[in-house]
């Protein structure tokens, strides 16, 4: 959503993206899905693409979700020492993050999975299983990424075990706990970056054709391209990374998926009402009429997997004042 900050490569098969305000990084493992590779031209010829049909997984699962009653653990994923391993995601907080904030981030994720109502479908169970198999990591820091500099900079020298944690646990963005001086953006910081983790990693695992970040025939890419072509999604703020087509392609799709989901849930108007010029579709009704591919993708995937957390729930956890 905001300007890309940094880029690092930790391993040949692990691409690290630092995005969105506080700075984040992501170990992304794209499947070998074939199709047309994404270029930095920002265009695709949909007439050459075949439909990507899906069938719900036939797996046994319990709809109920465990309550968040576990104690924080430590020392498993250095440099993070406040750990909650919950339903497919390892929530990992630095030592200066409050315990309460780590629990609230995990509670937000639990609500997305269905909360007290339980899982929505076998797709939800499949999402959890796939992310659990990959040991997906959601990193949580205090303040912004750049606050960790000098002898606190995130590297192996300052934090022995850092490389192993990040090389073996796919991750996308960090979530930053806001400092007391400004809590107004906390709710967006949390929901945006959790959704990045779920879509870039989880949806990519269970819908490798629909949510491919490397295939210009994937449904998410075609829906994004429709939004760009129709003038509702402006990617000009990412021009500074356009010379790297792989990174650029991933970031603009990642950000599009976030906009699509919060618009489909009708919570954008409460969380980010002034999102122009990047995103100018205001609610689910507008998305259905203006961007039919986005609406169809939301209905076919998001709606059957994730629960709308509602603005009221999110703001009760992360009030703006």
Image: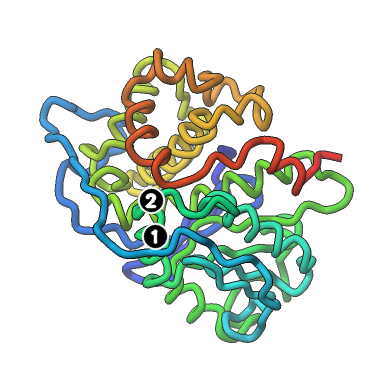
Label 2 SS: loop
Q: Say which of 233 and 315 sits in front.
A: 315
List x then y, in percent, for residue 200: 41, 51
Tell me which residue sits at (29%, 47%) in the image. Answer: 212
Coloration mode: rainbow
* Quadrant in the rendering for residue 59: bottom left
- How crowded is the residue under tag 1: few (<14 C-alpha within 10 Å), some, or many (20+)? many
If the image is split into quadrants, where does the N terminus sit?
A: top right
Residue 201 visible, this orientation? no
Tell me which residue sits at (44%, 38%) in the image. Answer: 257
Tell me which residue sits at (38%, 26%) in the image. Answer: 295
Question: Residue 125 — which label?
Answer: 1
Residue 118 visible, this orientation? yes
List x then y, in percent, for residue 58: 24, 58
* Quadrant in the rendering for residue 48: top left
| Left or right of 72 in this view: 41 | left
Q: Give the residue at mark 2.
A: 121
């Amino acid at each position: 959503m905001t300007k890309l900050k940094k880029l690092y490569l930790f391993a040949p098969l692990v691409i690290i993206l630092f995005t969105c305000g506080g700075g984040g990084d992501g170990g992304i493992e794209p499947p070998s899905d074939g199709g047309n590779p994404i270029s930095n031209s920002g265009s695709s010829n949909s007439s050459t693409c075949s439909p990507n049909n899906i069938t719900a997984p036939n797996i046994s699962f319990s709809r109920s979700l465990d309550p968040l009653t576990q104690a924080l653990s430590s020392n498993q994923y250095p440099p993070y020492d406040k750990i909650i391993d919950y339903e497919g995601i390892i929530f990992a907080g630095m030592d200066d993050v409050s315990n309460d904030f780590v629990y609230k981030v995990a509670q937000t994720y639990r609500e997305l999975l269905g909360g007290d109502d339980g899982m929505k479908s076998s797709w939800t169970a499949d999402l959890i299983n796939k992310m659990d198999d990959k040991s997906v990591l959601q990193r949580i820091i205090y303040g912004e990424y750049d606050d960790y500099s000098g002898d606190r900079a995130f590297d192996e020298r300052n934090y022995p075990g850092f490389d192993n944690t990040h090389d073996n646990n796919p991750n996308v963005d960090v979530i930053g706990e806001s400092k007391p001086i400004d809590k107004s953006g906390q709710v967006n910081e949390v929901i945006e970056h959790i959704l990045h983790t779920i879509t870039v990693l989880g949806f990519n695992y269970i819908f490798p054709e629909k949510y491919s970040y490397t295939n210009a025939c994937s449904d998410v890419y075609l829906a994004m391209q429709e939004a760009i072509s129709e003038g509702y999604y402006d990617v000009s703020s990412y021009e500074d990374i356009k010379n790297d087509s792989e990174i650029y392609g991933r970031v603009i799709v990642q950000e599009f998926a976030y906009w699509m989901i919060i618009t489909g849930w009708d919570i954008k108007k409460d969380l980010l009402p002034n999102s122009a010029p990047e995103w100018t579709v205001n609610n689910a009704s507008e998305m259905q009429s203006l961007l039919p591919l986005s609406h169809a993708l939301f209905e076919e995937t998001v709606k059957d997997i994730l629960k709308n957390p509602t603005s009221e729930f999110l703001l009760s956890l992360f009030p703006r004042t």
